[in-house]
Image (spheres, coloured by chain):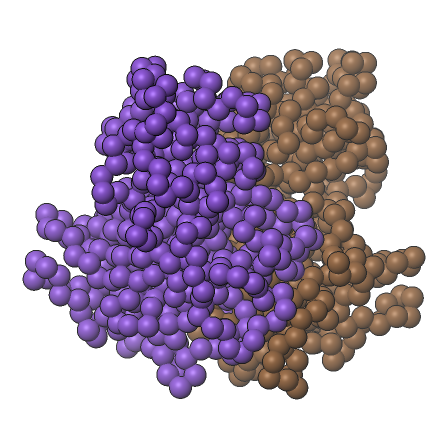
Chain colours: A purple, B brown
């Protein structure tokens, strides 16, 4: 076990009981204070820890980090590129520094003054510079629901679905960090009663509850990553809101897949939680039948028990939960996704993002999109304030949260939140 | 007219009559000499011109380039980011420096010694760091051929095709420069006589003859680029070989589009030829019927007359031409593609790449892929050495060339060449 995961450790930084960020989490992100330069940070409780300052004070000495400047960057990519032996050693060291028994650090006034900032005082930025972004389609329940609604209920899953983790390339440039508002996109749609398309703001604005992993190691063109190797290449996870314009998608997606229906904005949580932090939450995934081809077979528990929730918050009203799902429902796990992505020799880079696809579970309350929750709008959601929603309206804020919990600890992401503004 | 385009200008650097690189071209690329650092370069005839050395010698003084280091980079992105007023001024200045009437430059021994290198002595690298890559599907003939073969000859074009430039996001990481060999990819395919997929090297290895444009200006999320503005955002063009594994594509692409059938490698020509260099070759494109929505309408000639050719060269044999097509055949032009890409607010960055899709013309000899040339393999090509090809075999080299020509000048790309190696 990594030292950082010791469930009995407590920090001298105060952590509320229901916090996603105990000393066992130690996620990584990029923060900005005022107009200062962006800096690599971690978080314990509601305190952001400036890792550049921690490094300057010498606390990371001996960890084989030759350039302390790696903590003074606009993105985590260079830090992640140091490799898991170094980044995990940094996590372990952070756990030691902020352990409640560490009297020296606890009494280091410079450390407290230079490195600790209340989370409410900082601006969290995009954690990674995304090279390529893939969106998978790995929830059987989601694919079945969509296939039932738009194709054939008797053959909801297409023939390839259980043989390979279906996925497509998405737009990297429009992946933004939590808190970034997104305008309702305009585009072409074809009304059912017309032969001709029309142009205007989407009428069917949706979210998709997803998780994404960030790769931490590169390959060369022609190389492949096996399912056994895959976890070495996965640095960590974020919550991922794959915003979707359903009416635009329906008109454009044949035969080459979703394009403008997705590329107007995807939103991620600011803290990348390492795969190592979720080690205590490994579980078996759904049984895969028929048996998959050898390159997709794997050993051990490769799924993770992570509770996921989606809330809609109309303006001036309380948020209302519309979905509670779980990452463990995914039919295809991350190791299989990465093995599939690279089996043809496609090269990967540090900072690439691989999203799961909408994570729907078996029961109605666990569906991960408004499309499924309201079943194409036929069964609207009633919000706490009495309003109804078939899809997302202007000025609604969509909030996703995720955490794992056992008898000892809770590890989470905080949230990914985005307000939908009227069309430009 | 840009000074650089003066058709009467001649250079004191020798240029063969059929060269793609007269002094009117002045493309940009990245070259490496031995193990030196990569440098921004241009080319006249068979001479590569090191622009970092030209800058150090003071020839670019007064052009508002505050950092000469912009020419000493691994990619063109920073140079392109200077903006068209600067990069076009650099083209004009290069035309002046190497004009045969410029006695001072012609007799500058330091310039000749430091900046001029025979093209055979250098290594050309990837010209740009590609952020996002989109592949359009903009040739009506290609879409019709594919629709006829795989769907319904009576309704070969899908309902959306004439209303919007269909496109999808591709993989950026695996775009490589001419000369890079590519291994035959492995992946899943489903034999026609089986219910189950099998795993192995693709049996239907194909090329797609495409062109791609590189964006030279960024937008913010939420902004759109109109067809009238689009050319301001297009820095230049490259030849693009979109390698494809047809059997993998057929099995994987429903419903989310091509994925592993494309992501194992795409190959581009090393020289980015500016849009300005093709100014004399503007032509009208095909008539668009039905009329397109207002955001896709445009004024003036937005298509370009660029001759394109594909050759197959088996090992130890001469190359054999299998296709001659033309960029002017594209139904959707680049301005429309970029307007469509951004109409939903999707942001673009400097160095993004937007490929045309396979460029097939109306006659059989003008088809831009083996799939079409041999009509799914039913009509093999007979090569000069007597061999036949249905698709690409191991150790075949695929070469694409492209140039525009009128009574005065010829502007071209040179070539994009890639050898196909056996599966790893």
Instruction: Spot the residue most to the left.
Output: A386
Up/down of A76 relative to A166, above or below: above
Please state the horizontal and vertical placement of residue A168, each as a whole percent of the image. Answer: 50, 60
Q: Residue at x 42, y 45 (%)?
A: A277
Please state the horizontal and vertical placement of residue A365, each as a whole percent of the image. Answer: 24, 68
Left or right of B17: which side holds B167?
Answer: left
Which image quarter: residue B315? bottom right
Which image quarter: residue B208? bottom right
Which image quarter: residue A106? top left
Left or right of B365: which side holds A3?
Answer: left
Q: Is residue A244 visible?
A: no
Q: Nearer the viewer, residue B273 or B421?
A: B421
Q: Residue at x 51, y 34 (%)?
A: A89
Q: Nearer the viewer, residue B300 or B29?
A: B29
Please state the horizontal and vertical placement of residue A159, each as a whole percent of the image. Answer: 51, 79
Q: Nearer the viewer, residue A33 or A80?
A: A80
Q: Is residue A276 visible?
A: yes
Q: Nearer the viewer, residue A291 or B383?
A: A291
Left or right of B222: which side holds A391?
Answer: left
Left or right of A239: which side holds A172?
Answer: right
Q: Residue at x 32, y 35 (%)?
A: A10
Please state the horizontal and vertical placement of residue A79, each as a whole percent of the image. Answer: 51, 33
**Number of marks:** 0
Q: Residue at x 23, y 45 (%)?
A: A18
């Amino acid at each position: 076990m990594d030292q950082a995961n010791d469930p009995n450790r407590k920090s001298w930084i105060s952590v509320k009981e229901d916090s996603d960020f105990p000393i066992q989490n130690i996620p990584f992100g990029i923060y900005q204070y005022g107009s200062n330069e962006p800096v690599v940070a971690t978080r314990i409780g509601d305190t952001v820890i400036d890792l550049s300052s921690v490094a300057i004070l010498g606390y990371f000495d001996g960890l084989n980090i030759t350039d302390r400047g790696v903590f003074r960057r606009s993105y985590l990519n260079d830090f992640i590129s140091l490799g898991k032996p170094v980044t995990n050693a940094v996590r372990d060291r952070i756990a030691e520094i902020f352990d409640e028994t560490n009297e020296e650090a606890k009494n280091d006034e410079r450390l407290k003054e230079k490195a600790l900032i209340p989370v409410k005082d900082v601006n969290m930025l995009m954690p990674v510079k995304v090279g390529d972004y893939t969106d998978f389609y790995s929830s059987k329940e989601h694919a079945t629901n969509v296939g039932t609604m738009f194709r054939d209920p008797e053959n909801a899953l297409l023939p390839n679905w259980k043989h390979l983790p279906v996925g497509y390339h998405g737009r990297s440039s429009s992946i933004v960090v939590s808190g970034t508002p997104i305008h309702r996109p305009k585009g072409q749609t074809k009304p059912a009663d017309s032969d001709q398309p029309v142009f205007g703001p989407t009428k069917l604005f949706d979210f998709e509850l997803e998780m994404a992993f960030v790769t931490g190691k590169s390959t060369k063109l022609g190389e492949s990553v096996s399912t056994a190797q895959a976890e070495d290449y996965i640095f960590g996870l974020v919550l991922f809101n794959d915003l979707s314009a359903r009416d635009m998608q329906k008109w454009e997606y044949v035969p080459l897949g979703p394009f403008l229906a997705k590329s107007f904005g995807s939103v991620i949580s600011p803290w990348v939680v390492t795969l190592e932090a979720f080690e205590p939450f490994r579980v078996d995934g759904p049984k895969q039948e028929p048996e998959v081809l050898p390159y997709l077979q794997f050993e051990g528990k490769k799924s993770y028990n992570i509770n996921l929730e989606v809330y809609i918050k109309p303006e001036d009203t309380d948020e209302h939960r519309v979905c509670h799902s779980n990452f463990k429902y995914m039919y295809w796990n991350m190791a299989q996704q990465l093995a599939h992505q690279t089996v043809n020799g496609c090269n990967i880079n540090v900072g690439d993002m691989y999203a799961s696809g909408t994570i729907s579970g078996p029961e109605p309350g666990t569906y991960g999109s408004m499309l499924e929750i309201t079943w194409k709008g036929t069964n609207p959601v009633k919000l706490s304030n009495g309003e109804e929603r078939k899809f997302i309206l202007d000025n609604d804020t969509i909030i996703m949260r995720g955490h794992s919990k056992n008898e000892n600890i809770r590890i989470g992401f905080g949230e990914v939140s985005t307000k939908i503004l009227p069309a430009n």
